[in-house]
Amino acid sequence: MKPYQHVLVPVDFSQISTSIVARANELAKFYQAKLTLLNVLEDVPLGAVAFGGTGELTMPPAMQQNQINQATEKLRKLEETYGLVDNAALEAVYTAGKPSAAILQFAKENGVDLIVVGNSGRRGVLGFMGSTAEATVKGASCDVMAVRISD
């Protein structure tokens, strides 16, 4: 089994996801792997077009870019807080689809061989941190590590 070369951590800036960053950073250092923090910004429709139109109103490109800039700044703060490995990459992407699909696509396109997500250890609906982590685990073509997060 060859060592991991590219570790991906999807983050939403919650306390749980920042704890996962620390664990993923340890793994990246151990394997001397590239570490990527990825924040996926979901384009949530703002409403329907007025007067019987069939389209949905989405966020204007300038607002999308503003959100990407804010997310990138938060990623930089995580980088500083955890003293991430020298070859850490910070990515903020915008998607019109589900965040899990963007995570899986990013992993495939960028040669990720390990995705690190969080698990609270709960059973049932609250078992994983929402459906994004669960969908990532189910759809990934690479290894996925679920880090147990205590309540």
Image (cartoon, rainbow, N blue to C red):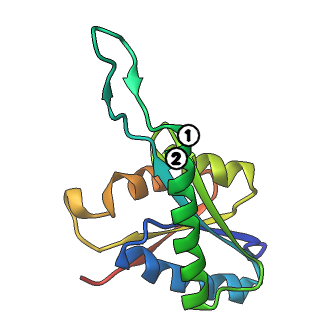
Q: Residue at x 28, y 8 (%)?
A: 52
Left or right of 43 in this view: 130? left
Q: Residue at x 53, y 54 (%)?
A: 66
Name the quadrant containing residue 84: bottom right
Is residue 52 in sight in this rendering?
yes
Residue drawn at 43 percent across, 74 percent down: 17
Q: Position of residue 120 (x, y in %)?
A: 30, 74
- Relative to 122, is 129 on the left or the right? right
The one of 11 and 143 positioned closer to us in this rendering: 11
Is residue 139 visible in the rendered image? The answer is no
Query: For the residue carrying disc 2, how many other residues have a C-alpha within 10 Å: few (<14), some (14-19), or many (20+)?
Result: some
Q: Amino acid at mark 2?
A: Gln
Q: How far apart are labels 1 and 2 at the CA level?
A: 5 Å
From the top left corner, tell me how far across and down residue 70 is, in percent: 52, 64
Question: Which residue is nearer to you in this view: 70 or 113?
Answer: 70
Residue located at (56% from left, 71% from top): 73
Tell me whether the residue at label 1 lies in contact with that at label 2, contact meaning CB atoms closer than 8 angstroms: yes
Which mark is on residue 61? 1
Q: Which residue is mark 2?
A: 64
Compared with residue 80, is residue 66 higher up or lower down, i.e. above or below? above
